[in-house]
Amino acid sequence: MPNKIDLHTHTLYSDGALAPCELVELAHLNGLQTISITDHDSMNALKEATECARDLGMDIITGVEISTDLDDKEIHLLAYFIDEGNEELQKYLSFFRDERLHRAKRMVKKLQNLGLKITLDDVLDYAKNSAVGRPHIAYAMTDLGIVKNYQEAFERYIGDYGPAFERKIHVSPQSALKLINDSGGLSFIAHPGYMKEHLLMSLIKAGVDGIEVIHPCHNENQIQFYRGIVNQYCLLESGGSDFHGGKKMDNDNLGKYYISGSQLDAMRKMLQKNSA
């Protein structure tokens, strides 16, 4: 049996539906041997997930997903093998979790101004102690009957061009890459199928270590295209399910989208080279 590795998953510490242990157990049930939890601006799931994984004979790769801004477009970077104890990294994560809360407050206010009956407490009931984001607002709107489903919340109200949308504060890609490098990690462009090719090339020139080639939003042609870019520029290849669970209805993706042990070995070799 091949070593199935999923390096893009989320827990309730950001916009996922499952607790860390629940995610690890489901990943194990779906045939995964190694996962990375890449919550948005949070590494709070790591301790619990690592303990559960140890009991199941699984491995956890430290990870986090960071939002950056390039040419007025939101770009996500995945960071792996980072030192969770890095002081600058933890300052960044704490600051941006606070900023996420302020953004949620502004979005809820806009929804209220549109005549919709929703409060910040409704949203925080879903977010609890996690890094609050738009999915939590969408979940609340669905259960309050404001919209029929999660997708409608984004399409009508909180999507990038919706009447209740609010931009996040971002760091530049260069700043994010320095933060990742200084914490001993590797940086990957997340789900590039969403971005224009010139943005992809800008990130490569900025010094990103790799590209997330395998992702549910990538068709076979895109996979081959990004794999060609990886080979052309001597980059690393990553991939995963971008699993969230719950109302995203993506349970079937866990164990379906993964990379191989050889691709993970290439990352480890790069880390050794960087530390030499």
Image (cartoon, grey):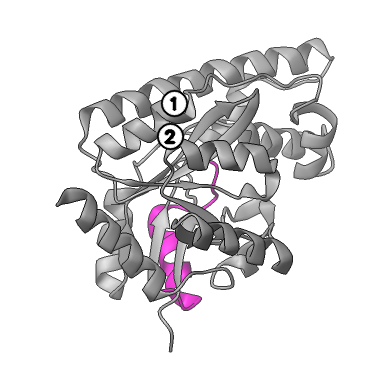
x and y, in percent, of residue 8 in the image: 49, 55
- Give me the disc on residue 245: none
Residue 219 in the figure: left or right of residue 95: right
Q: Which residue lies furthest to the left in this view?
A: 276
Q: Residue at x 69, y 45 (%)?
A: 194
Residue visible at 65% across and 67% down?
224
Which corner quadrant of the image does residue 110 belong to?
Answer: top right
Q: Do the residues labelled 1 and 2 touch (CB within 8 Å)?
A: yes
At x 40% / y 79%, what residue is drawn? 3
Q: Residue at x 48, y 38 (%)?
A: 205
Look at the image and tell me whether residue 219 can be seen: no
Q: How busy is the neighbourhood of tag 2: few (under 14 within 10 Å), some, or many (20 plus)?
A: many
Amino acid bearing label 1: Arg
Per the image, is 263 magenta? no
Q: As drawn, which residue projects farthest toward the front?
A: 232
* Classed neighbour count for the residue bearing mark 1: other residues with Cα under 10 Å, few (<14), some (14–19), many (≥20): some
The answer to whether 149 is drawn above or below residue 119 in the figure is below
Question: Magenta segment, which residues?
Answer: 15-33
Check disc 2 and report the residue beneath it. 41
Extreme-bottom residue of the structure: 1
Question: Pointer 1: what residue?
Answer: 97
